[in-house]
Amino acid sequence: MMKTISENRCFGGVQGVYSHNSEACGVDMTFAVFLPEIAEEAPVPVLWYLSGLTCTHENAMTKAGAQAWAAREGIALVFPDTSPRGDGVADDEAYDMGQGAGFYVNATEAPWAPHFNMWDYVAEELPALLAGTFSIDPDRQGITGHSMGGHGALTLAMGLPGRFRSVSAFAPICNPTASDWGRKQLGGYLGPDESVWAKHDATLQMAARGFDGPMLIDTGTADQFGDLLKTESLAAAIAEKRQPATLRMQRGYDHSYFFVSTFMEDHVAFHAEALWR
Amino acid sequence: MMKTISENRCFGGVQGVYSHNSEACGVDMTFAVFLPEIAEEAPVPVLWYLSGLTCTHENAMTKAGAQAWAAREGIALVFPDTSPRGDGVADDEAYDMGQGAGFYVNATEAPWAPHFNMWDYVAEELPALLAGTFSIDPDRQGITGHSMGGHGALTLAMGLPGRFRSVSAFAPICNPTASDWGRKQLGGYLGPDESVWAKHDATLQMAARGFDGPMLIDTGTADQFGDLLKTESLAAAIAEKRQPATLRMQRGYDHSYFFVSTFMEDHVAFHAEALWR
């Protein structure tokens, strides 16, 4: 059922792009996997990278520079898409709703419910496919992401206790229930009852349960979307919860992949330490 | 006259994109410059990166991963465009002719002659602009490039003795006077007299004069354009000339940026050794 779209030799390993018919999303979904060379010998740990608004599987695969460090650390990378796509899939004119903006939730509302099940896709379906297909060790998983993908990484890590050994994020959306990057989407996908939104808010999840493992968050002081991210809410929640975590406000950096790539080495090393231990 | 299009903090330095009215090309040209943090204190060496067919200043800037290593080595990077562009500029339906395919020559033939002067642009105009604008040391320049840009790097390095201390290339077009990646373009831009093509053929230049400095070339054994590159011609010319050079055929790599980014660390380190000495 899985189709190979491309495979390129990369840092001694293989950067592949694949598609498959997703049951969770009811359409063909495309994703990318980087396998380091040592995966030929034995299963390796895996780091999930969830992307942000408007992105596909491709942006981070080509611009984040993660393969250099993953090859060095002997870790696989997975880059899922950010939403279902295609002619039969609902969409919205706004860049931050619909296709390219799945927000890592299972939609319950029309017109989104039939296809927008990115939580199940990333939490259940794709891991099962990967475990049966690639030389990766499902007992050693970490997760990271950028912006909306940072939101996804944090909420999945806290929402699936025991699944991920480590979590990090680049400029994550931290408190979507209180932000224009969140209220519209959670309302649209999940309906008006805000109690069901809480599962998808990293700040609320931090207050409610936290994460059993190390956490690393980088956000730029010059992030042009800083007001929408609400980093201050998560920072306060982390401190109040006494959550083991490192939050770094990086001087002068903005929201771009120039920021992400700059700190990718740190993030991969952070996960490697947790995953190879 | 120079306009700043964007500047992003990147690996402690600044990745900028700029445009200016080019006299050589008779149109506005866009280019990118990465300055490492230490350029704030004193001028730094500069490494030119010339891009391949269909590329702009942007491809390598976002996909080659060069800033990580340039920041570490304290070297500036320059990414010129690959041709003049715009409504008033001649073009061709083929991807390998006209806009995006300047081949680093000064065209003498219609309809190309008015704008297609990429040799002068890269050899004279842009260096003068950079030297007067950025904290770079014009006495410490190296040059590299990919595919058509590797051709440009090699021919400019050999054609401008004393200008570049070091030259390297990723999967360069090595012998365009004998390849379908070259004969059409050199004929179109320079006319039917093949004697004037020789300046723009790395193999012929190697035989005629060579390069006074170190040279590094990487090409993948699985390069899908291997037959067009004619690496074997340049390899033979290097050996015959007794040119100090390292030519590496990299097992399993193709022509993509996954190949380029894999070996970028080596290339930047190679140039740094020559430029900081």
Image (cartoon, coloured by chain):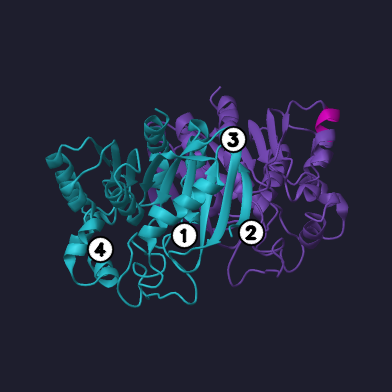
Chain colours: A cyan, B purple
Labelled pair 1, 3 in contact (Cβ < 8 Å): no
- Give the labeled residue for mark 4: A182
Q: Is residue B114 left or right of residue B132?
A: right
- Give the labeled residue for mark 2: B54
In the rendered image, residues at marks 3 and 2 fall on the same chain = no
Question: Can you tell which of label 4 and label 2 is closer to the viewer?
Answer: 4
Q: Nearer the viewer, residue A68 or B160?
A: A68
Q: Nearer the viewer, residue B45 or B247?
A: B247
In the rendered image, residues at marks 3 and 4 fall on the same chain = yes
**What secondary structure is found at the residue carrying circle 3?**
helix
How much space separates mark 3 and mark 2, taking CA atoms? 31 Å
Q: Earlier in the sequence, mark 3 or mark 4?
A: 3
- Give the labeled residue for mark 1: A56
Quadrant showing the C terminus of chain A: top left
Labelled pair 3, 4 in contact (Cβ < 8 Å): no
Q: Is-magenta flag for residue A172? A: no
Q: Residue at x 45, y 41 (%)?
A: A46
- Give the labeled residue for mark 3: A37
Callout 3: few (<14), some (14-19), or many (20+) C-alpha neighbours within 10 Å? Answer: many
Callout 1: few (<14), some (14-19), or many (20+) C-alpha neighbours within 10 Å? Answer: many
Q: Residue at x 77, y 59 (%)?
A: B185
In the rendered image, residues at marks 1 and 3 fall on the same chain = yes
Label 2: chain letter: B
What is the magenta range? B237-241
**What secondary structure is found at the residue carrying circle 2?**
loop
Name which residue type carries label 3: Glu
Labelled pair 1, 4 in contact (Cβ < 8 Å): no
Q: Is residue B76 left or right of residue B187?
A: left
Question: Can you tell which of label 3 and label 2 is closer to the viewer?
Answer: 3
